[in-house]
Amino acid sequence: MDNCIFCKIINKEIPSTVVYEDDRVLAFKDIQPVAPVHVLIVPKKHIPSVKDIQPGEEGYLVDIHKAAVKIAQELGIAENGFRLINNCGKGGGQTVFHLHYHLIGGAELGAKLI
Ligand code: AMP
Ligand code: ZN
């Protein structure tokens, strides 16, 4: 997708610090981390948000969750715990409209909304 920053990262047109990659998903460090570990996990297919997932694309959610656990284990935050967050739509706080999950951990996380 033209003009999508995460598609450009996936296509290696702009740099990122990749922490995990397979044929379906890419994970890279957030440029404005809110915790010692702050990784974005994205499908390699351009899907704008979780509400835009089409029939047949649901598997990306499983892939993203599996990647999150693997990355959390590799980065040493799985045992203590982590958060996996999706912001959906402008009202949900989404600013980049390529589906992504924030994997956050490595510190005691405060400020829970729920
Ligand atoms: P959201 O507000 O849920 O859409 O999250 C978008 C996230 O993308 C923010 O946490 C940004 O810091 C992050 N971000 C934006 N541009 C880049 C980039 N070029 N590389 C890594 N992270 C980015
Ligand atoms: Zn995209």
Image (tube, grey):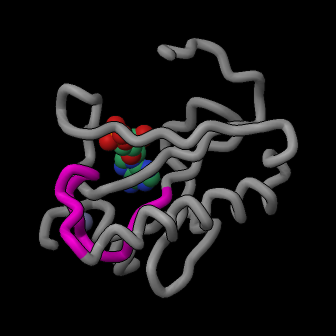
Residue range (magenta): 41-55
Identify the residue at horizontal 84%, vertical 37% (top origin): 80
Instruction: Give the total number of marks visible in the rendering.
Output: 0
User: Against 35, is 60 above or below?
Assistant: below
Q: In the rendered image, which quarter contains the N terminus?
A: bottom left
Q: Is residue 2 left or right of residue 24?
A: left
Ligand 1 shown in quarter: top left
Judging depth in this view, the residue of 58 and 69 nearest the camera is: 58
Q: Is residue 20 magenta?
A: no
Pick out the residue farthest to the front.
55
Q: Is residue 71 left or right of residue 10?
A: right
User: Against 64, is 29 above or below?
Assistant: above
Residue 33 coordinates in the image, percent (x, y): 56, 37
Pick out the residue farthest to the bottom.
23
Which quadrant of the view contains residue 84? top right
Which quadrant of the view contains residue 18? bottom right
Judging depth in this view, the residue of 27 and 13 nearest the camera is: 27
Identify the residue at horizontal 57%, vertical 12% (top origin): 111
User: Against 109, is 9 above or below?
Assistant: below
Q: Is residue 81 left or right of residue 9?
A: right
Question: Magenta stretch: dominant SS?
Answer: loop
Q: Is residue 48 magenta?
A: yes
Q: Is residue 40 left or right of residue 46?
A: right
Identify the residue at horizontal 40%, vertical 69% (top origin): 60
Judging depth in this view, the residue of 23 and 113 nearest the camera is: 113
Residue 2 coordinates in the image, percent (x, y): 13, 71
Residue 17 coordinates in the image, percent (x, y): 57, 63
